[in-house]
Amino acid sequence: MTTEIDTITLATDKLLKCPKFRAWLKMEMRRLGISDREAPCAVQSAMEQADRKEITLQYAPVRFEIPLVDDVWVNPRYLREFYASRGCRHPEKDRLIALLVQLIHAGIYRL
């Protein structure tokens, strides 16, 4: 399957702090059924898939350098913390969660 998408813009800190966006993001992650253990691997695999398909990931106007998820996702139970949180305490992790949902919705990555 080929995709016509060539650039995906990552969620900004402002968007990640928006209560409606966070509620939607939590709902989507629950709907996808990704566990704490699966989440870091799913995020890393989704970013690698986007890279293989030559999709540019950008944050604001600059290219987003794909990190090693293990360097960002230190707490293996972060997804539980994400679901329980009322606000955005770790934007770098929440941005990766939002990116995973974006890549799934765009048909770039499949679970």
Image (tube, rainbow, N blue to C red):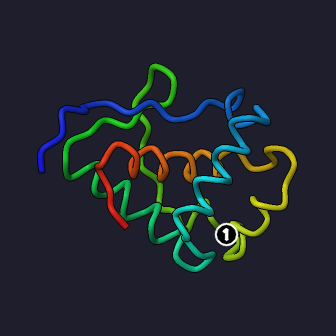
Kindly identify the residue that appears in the image at 63 percent across and 47 percent down: 25
Q: Name the residue under label 1.
A: 74
Q: In which quarter of the image is residue 4?
A: top left
Instruction: Please state which of residues 57 and 63 is positioned toward the viewer in this rendering.
Output: 57
x and y percentages locating residue 80 in the rendered image: 75, 69
| Total number of numbered discs in the rendering | 1
For this orientation, the residue located farthest to the right is: 86
With respect to residue 11, does 73 lie above or below?
below
In the structure shown, which secondary structural element does the residue marked by tag 1 occupy? Answer: loop
For this orientation, the residue located farthest to the bottom is: 37
With respect to residue 90, does 63 lie above or below?
above
For this orientation, the residue located farthest to the top is: 61
Tell me if 60 is positioned left or right of 108 in this view: right
Kindly identify the residue that appears in the image at 62 percent across and 30 percent down: 12
Tell me if 68 is positioned left or right of 92 in this view: left
Kindly identify the residue that appears in the image at 31 percent across and 58 percent down: 48
x and y percentages locating residue 3 in the rendered image: 18, 40
For this orientation, the residue located farthest to the left is: 1
With respect to residue 42, does 26 lie above or below?
above
Classify 10 Å Cα crowding around label 1: few (below 14), some (14-19), many (20 and above).
Answer: few
Q: What type is the residue that disc 1 sits on?
A: Val
The quadrant in which the C terminus is found is bottom left
With respect to residue 109, does 42 lie above or below?
below
